[in-house]
Image (cartoon, helix red, strand yellow):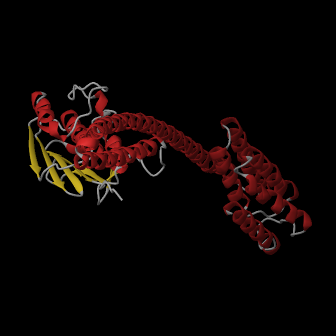
Amino acid sequence: MLDIALTAAFGIAGIVLLFGNYESAEVDYLPGDFVGVLLILGSTVPVLFRRSAPAAAGLIGAIVTSGFLVWNYSAPLAVVVMLILVYSCAAYGTLSGSIGVLLAHLGVSIGYTVTLAETLASDYELIALNAVFSTIGFGGLWAMGRAAQGRRRYLGELEDRTARLVDAREAEVRAALSEERSRIARELHDVVAHHVSVMTVQASGARRLMDRDPERSAEALVAIESTGRAALTEMRRIVGVLRDPSNRGADTADTGDARFPVTSTGSQASSGVSGRAERAPQPSLAELDALAEQFRQAGLPVQVTIDGFADEIPVGVDLTAYRIIQEALTNTIKHAGPSTATIAVQYSPDEVILRITDDGRGLAAALDGRQPGHGLLGMRERVALYGGTLAVGPRRDGGFDVRARIPIEPVSLQ
């Protein structure tokens, strides 16, 4: 749109000046006619394609503008159009093409001065001065155009590099999420296997008691039903986590007031503190003191406070809470620097609330040049699997804060 507006403006203004000013000029220009209009249009139309074909536009403009000298037409706006074409060729064209256009327009400008000096019988100092000023003017705009092209290319390279980094980051996040979901699915598989084992034992006991003690056998059947429903719930979660839903796994964590980038370490499986083989029995919050002691031995003072009683917490919720605490402490010991950590666990009939805080550097670890991991992604996946919430971020008084709420879904026997 800008080029169309420039072309129209210069064309209309040039035609108006062509027919209106030739009589008052010191030089005896030809009056405006059809040929003069064609020269005006021919010198301004190249502005339309000064970006798509800058060298061609510049050369056509220079050739047509020289027609004003050959036929002695007035062209007061021609120099402005020439400057635009020289700048455009330098900004959008090749180096050799822009130099050719620059020399062509300098030649036209100096030729116009020579013709004017001869017509007015002027001192040829006018030619020398015009040559100097033309060189400065056209050369300056040419240099500005080359600088603009260089800056545009530099910005384009930065944008391309940023796009490549974003693509690489997204691929890395997807790979980390896939690995974490597979890990969660394997752990939930162990949970389901545990439920099935319990059901098998309960069914065996109910069968033996069926004739001797029907009441206790009925209680065992109720327990089997409850355990079976819990196993089905965990099985549905396994299927859900392997479906890779699009509404989970963003590389940010919801902190309530803001969005904080993921800056934690790798998955729990890579932590040297846990010391637990992947195929070992799945841990629970009953082992929280032992976990805290492992981190104390690794150099991180840990305090544990528990509010309430862990009555009938589903195995999956218990495992999820343990893993969140484990990952939060791993992040602290790797990123927070010298610090202390506090673990607060609050039990209620319908949820488990966790808060893990430290007084270390918080998110400053993201600025020290190390590549962040995806531990918070794993936390987010685990909490979302049970319909809970996760809030992470730096504390106002220093350190880092991880808060998680994991609902406890009651098992209905209806």
Give how far across and how far down residue 41 sits, in percent. Answer: 82, 62
Spot the residue most to the right. Answer: 34
Q: Quadrant of residue 262?
A: top left
Spot the residue most to the front. Answer: 211
In the image shown, does 170 or 159 lie closer to the viewer? 170
Q: Quadrant of residue 15?
A: bottom right
201 relative to 343 in the view: left or right: right
Residue 114 seen in render = yes
Give how far across and how far down residue 9 sits, in percent. Answer: 72, 68
Give how far across and how far down residue 77 sits, in percent. Answer: 72, 63
In the image shown, does 353 or 226 lie closer to the viewer? 226
Give how far across and how far down residue 404 sits, in percent. Answer: 25, 51
In the image shown, does 267 or 152 lie closer to the viewer? 267
The residue lying at 75 percent from left, 57 percent from top is 48
Can you say whether 214 is above or below 68 in the image?
A: above
The residue lying at 69 percent from left, 63 percent from top is 1
In the image shown, does 272 or 120 lie closer to the viewer? 272
